[in-house]
Amino acid sequence: MNLTLVCLILGLLMVSCDGLTRSMDTVIETPPNVKIISTEPTALIDAIGDNPNLKNPIIKIPDQIPTILTSEIPVNKTPLKVEVVAEDLFVPWSLVFTSPQRLLVSERNGFIREILNGQLNPKPLISFSEVAARQEAGLLGLAIDPEYDQNKFLYACITIQRGNAFINRVVKLRDMDSSIQVVGVIIDDIPAAANHAGGRIHFGPDGKLYITTGDALNKDLAQEIKSLAGKLLRINADGSIPEDNPIPGSPVFALGLRNSQGFAWHPLNGNMYLIEHGPSGFDGAPGGDEINLVQPAGNYGWSLVSHTKMLAGTLPPLAEFTPAIAPASGLFYRGSLFPQFTNSFLFSGLRGEGLFRIEIDKDDFYRISVIDKLNISVGRIRDVVEAPDGSIYFTTSNRDGRGQVRSGDDKVYRITPQ
């Protein structure tokens, strides 16, 4: 099939999504004489496999998916100093540094808090009164504009309730130092639910904003190309669609995700790696959490396949974790305080109650060469970020209804060498 025609077809399929057309206030004209092709995942992957927008190198996909038994992950021997930075927070979901001395924290019940010179400001910088804080939904990811030093823009993903339904929207904010103001909505009507709401947002090395979305408890949506649920989205900072997105006119960058809440770019090979929550019993055999190497227009299989099963037309993970560890955020460490961690992927575990570390093989982007778990025991861990000085900050999530609440929870911690 002619590539141009295929791209027009896929663009047509996506622009009918209510969330896209309403949030952008634009209507894309239907191209004439276009036939609807199959929306089966294999057909989609075959159709866009030669798209010139797909810039990642060709990756050799393994014949088997390794299972990592979480009960057998060894403990890393690096001595760590773990200290409390702030406490008495409510499910601190996301951390961002605006300067070496200033850290912003989103609380799931709608507050953005400030930690300045190690002291928690008792007054929120902003309170989103419309936030629907239900189970996994609420005020979720934060991101800093690549030009923050000049424009002071921030971004937040929030869940709101509309009738009996939940949606996620990403809002642009302006940091006024002593307060935060809403500038506007850049993308709206992302399907959400009390669970499987996604919500992690980061700017990539390309200056584009990436957004994870959950399947909103409707697993079929992850394979529906017209839905924004169960996807990885990519947009410009103003909400417009990048011209080099793999599906023209669509914010969808990858599909077939259940509920991803973390991703980061490898400092050396430049690839994006994404963590993914596996099924929980009601929607499949428990376990099967994943580490994925993201390719533009990649289909990661949910809900057609999970665990170590493979399906033509979908991309398998690097590995799957069973029993579940519930990965919630991740980063590639670039600092010098922990040279033994440099270029390692650190990711948090909720059910796994810890910070995990993997190394990607330098010659094989699809192979994990090392995995271990940091020697930390503070309960469920939600977000993990690297500070400008190379120290590591993370948050607990013991007040999210699934953990054992400890004195002073929830907390922000800082890790430095012992």
Image (cartoon, rainbow, N blue to C red):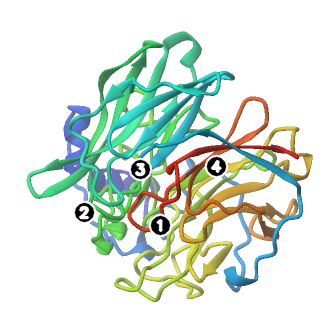
* Distance between the alpha carbons at the discs numbered 3 and 2: 34 Å
For the point 77% across and 62% down, the residue is 374
144 relative to 258 in the view: left or right: right
* Distance between the alpha carbons at the discs numbered 1 and 3: 20 Å
Q: Tell me where residue 180 appears, x and y as whole percent.
A: 38, 20
274 relative to 142 in the view: left or right: right
**Residue holding disc 1:** 403
Q: Tell me where residue 364 appears, x and y as whole percent.
A: 82, 66
Q: Tell me where residue 28 appears, x and y as whole percent.
A: 23, 39
The circle drawn on residue 35 is 2
Crowding at mark 2 (Cα within 10 Å: few <14, some 14-19, many 20+): few
Crowding at mark 3 (Cα within 10 Å: few <14, some 14-19, many 20+): many
Q: Look at the numbered disc 3 and give the secondary structure of its residue.
A: loop
The amino acid on which the numbered mark 2 sits, given as a three-letter code, is: Lys
Q: Nearer the viewer, mark 4 or mark 1?
A: 1
The circle drawn on residue 199 is 3
* Distance between the alpha carbons at the discs numbered 4 and 3: 14 Å
The amino acid on which the numbered mark 3 sits, given as a three-letter code, is: Gly
